[in-house]
Image (spheres, grey):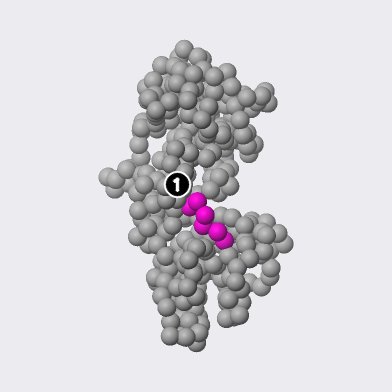
Amino acid sequence: MQIHQDFQWLDPSARGASCAMGNFDGVHLGHASVIDLARGRGPLGVITFEPHPRQFFAPDAPPFRLMNAEARANRLAKLGVEHLFQLPFNRALAALTPEEFARDVLAEGLGISHVVVGADFCFGKGRSGTAHDLRALGERFGFATTIAPLVQIAGREVSSTAIRQALTEGRPRDAAAMLGHLHRIEGEVIHGEKRGRELGYPTANMSLSGLHLPRFGVYAVKVDVLTGPHSGAYMGAASLGVRPMFSGEVPNLETYLLDFKGDLYGHHLSVALVEFLRPEMKFDGLPALIAQMEADCAQARAILATA
């Protein structure tokens, strides 16, 4: 998949794409349906924005994203997307009227042949343009528009908001049902305080900065090591939260890979939340903590053996 960071000076080979357009946070089943409707009418593309417009307009609001840009790109590539147009969302883009966006960005800039959006899609300054406005503008500027119906499961609309709620409540399987895949946290392994190593359970530490925080606690996880000599798939148990036993303050993700030995610092991991095991807790001492970690790993192993 080719990633394009702007709509100007685009390589001619990337023009003429049939594109799905939206924020695609989580790349859930609703997003997948929009992408599927774009297939078969030219090179398959996705038009999205970085940062997320909500981040741009409310930078001090609590983190809400289900995935960072790297994780989103990885998921879109798995869906067969050939061109990812990851447009920088800035004051200039936000100020474009719906007509200017359709003409300058979609028609003249990207040269798209076809665009698919959800029925609730809004665009242009002040979110003043609707999906039906986009269809009319496409007729003027030379591209076709398809409006995708919203996707429901058991009578409930699939949305990033509903997925965030499931994760907040510690229901990763319900989130996965709406996503169409396990919820994953991706990023680089960073140096921590190395307490896990001292306790006999060395962990791979990852930042949660900018992401929506699932329920704090311990999870059974599936881990893909994406880079380095240990690349591959593993099972694990992960602690997500602030480590109350050690008076932590900044949330992070600490993952213990079962049956693994090696150095993962600086390499990239994709950690999938499979099942919530228990909430964070304090223990009377290190022996009690170690005994609980051993029990957590045994429970995670049993769950993942059939997951």
Instruction: Residue 294: give x, y in percent of width and height.
Output: 50, 80
Residue at 62% in and 61% down: 189
175 or 185: nearer the viewer: 185
Residue at 67% in and 64% down: 265
Above or below: residue 244 compared with residue 189: below
Q: Label 1, on which residue?
A: 60
Quadrant of the snapshot with the N terminus = top right
Amino acid residing under circle 1: Asp
> Magenta residues, as a range?
206-211
Instruction: Residue 41: give x, y in percent of width and height.
Output: 53, 25
Whether residue 39 appears in this view of the structure is: no
153 or 276: nearer the viewer: 276
Above or below: residue 119 compared with residue 201: above
Q: Secondary structure at mark 1?
A: loop
Residue at 58% in and 76% down: 195
49 or 15: nearer the viewer: 49
